[in-house]
Amino acid sequence: MATEVVEVGEDPRPVPREKINHTLTKLFGAALLVSFCFVFFSNASGVEKAERVNANGGERRGGRPLMEKPDASFTLLPEMARHVGKGDSLKEQCDLFDGKWVPNPSEPAYTNSSCKFIDPPQNCMTNGRPDTEYLHWRWQPYGCDLPPFDAQKFLCAMRNKGWALIGDSIFRNQIESLLCLLSKVEEAVEIYHDKTFKTRTWYFSSHNFTLSIIWAPFLVKAEIAENSEGKSKHDIQLYLDTLERTWTSEYQKYDYIVISGGQWFLKTTIFWENNTVVGCHYCSGENIKELGMDYSYRKALQLVFRFITNSDHKPVVLFRTWTPDHFEHGEWFSGGVCNRTRPYKEGEFSGGSEDSLMRGVEIEEFTNAAAVGAKNGTRLKLLDTHHLSLLRPDGHPGPYRRFHPDLRKKPQNDCLHWCLPGPIDTWNDLVMEMLLNEEDWRYST
């Protein structure tokens, strides 16, 4: 049985279970919401027209260049990642993920005081981060607009549906953003959590909508044991021919799946296939062949996509791309910091070599899977948050992962997860646009 990792910077807070009370008041409110949703969507054609780490990181090789020219792989997307509206003119195509960050005078959609779902390590406002400029940028795609998240429209469309986000702690970051955005209309009730509070489920009773996060950092079976500082007690054993049952056993339950690999693949890992050790990543001192992190990532994604495309159950599946970090002058364990207060301009920074390598793997495997899925009704879409996230070194907690840290003591920084509110809210804007607004595109000429 795999042992759960304890992540640096985590502060899991038990949330007591609450009963879902169906009082007459709630029934009346639900009836009003049903009426609203019916009117709101009477001219729409339905949701199914749409086909959007861990600060403790792990042992990693070398550093990364701080300033590089952009790599073409950051902006070139497979054709199925682009959005095409009515008609087939090139003018009517919009790549949501190709754009720039522009100043936004509006206040964020929620704050630390208006949302209770923000975990302490991402609660930058409460933790004393002094600057606020990082809150006032919005993503502007070239050739179209990205509307802000519409909680009412989203919940109406998701009535009687179920969502699952499958992966690592970056998804916890994203799901907390989503819970905050939705709380403007209805506040969810937690109805399940595992003993580590890493796999959790929330319920929106007025809309009969279920939202879950399923902890599966490698997506494939892994034996993990780490101490409270995120350091391995022994090398992680990774079974590249066996999917993690925590998510495959639940797959049939959901109408929408968002899934991703992540920076756990950078950790020291031993690779198993057919009950035999076949290689490793970064296992110096072991008499095992070095195959590299891209080997395990490719094998894992191939197995994941094969499961998705072969499954009789056909939910809408969004594959979210690689999340870069912004550690400078070191790594998470060696004094790395992220103290920038503005986004990068295009061309200032293109990430490290591992970012380019892993992104190349996932784009190739997604493209292959999408080609297979197109033939059998698999609804697979690319949620390509990589490049827009790469440009936001200012959006991380940094030292403010702790409450009012003493900066003189050079506290550990978190340059991977995102402040809430912050840039990760844009990921949910993208999800909304990809799945609900395809018929509402406004194109520039």
Image: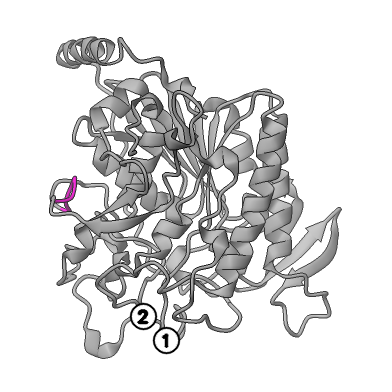
Q: Which mark is residue 329?
A: 1
Work out which quarter of the rendered image holds the C terminus and state it: top left
Q: Nearer the viewer, residue 263 or 356?
A: 356
**Is residue 206 placed above or below 295 in the rendered structure?**
above
Q: Residue at x 40, y 86 (%)?
A: 335
Please tell me how crowded label 2 is: few (under 14), some (14-19), or many (20+) other residues with Cα within 10 Å: many
The amino acid beneath tag 1 is His
Disc 1 vs disc 2: Cβ atoms closer than 8 Å? yes
Q: Position of residue 260 (x, y in %)?
A: 55, 49
**Is residue 61 placed above or below 225 in the rendered structure?**
below
Dominant SS in magenta:
loop
Label 2: which residue? 337
Q: Measure how far apart labels 1 and 2 are at the Cα level.
A: 7 Å
Q: Position of residue 91 (x, y in %)?
A: 43, 36
Circle 1: element type: loop
The amino acid beneath tag 2 is Val
Q: Specify the quadrant of the image occupied by residue 440.
A: top left
Q: Residue at x 29, y 60 (%)?
A: 419
Image: magenta residue range:
107-112
Numbered label tally: 2
Res. 225 visible in picture: no
Q: Position of residue 70 (x, y in %)?
A: 49, 69
Please tell me how crowded label 1 is: few (under 14), some (14-19), or many (20+) other residues with Cα within 10 Å: some
Q: Specify the quadrant of the image occupied by residue 394.
A: bottom left
Circle 2: element type: loop
Q: Nearer the viewer, residue 122 or 381?
A: 381
| Earlier residue among tags 1 and 2 | 1
Res. 186 visible in picture: yes
- Residue furthest to the bottom: 408
Horizontal relation, residue 193 to residue 396: left or right: right
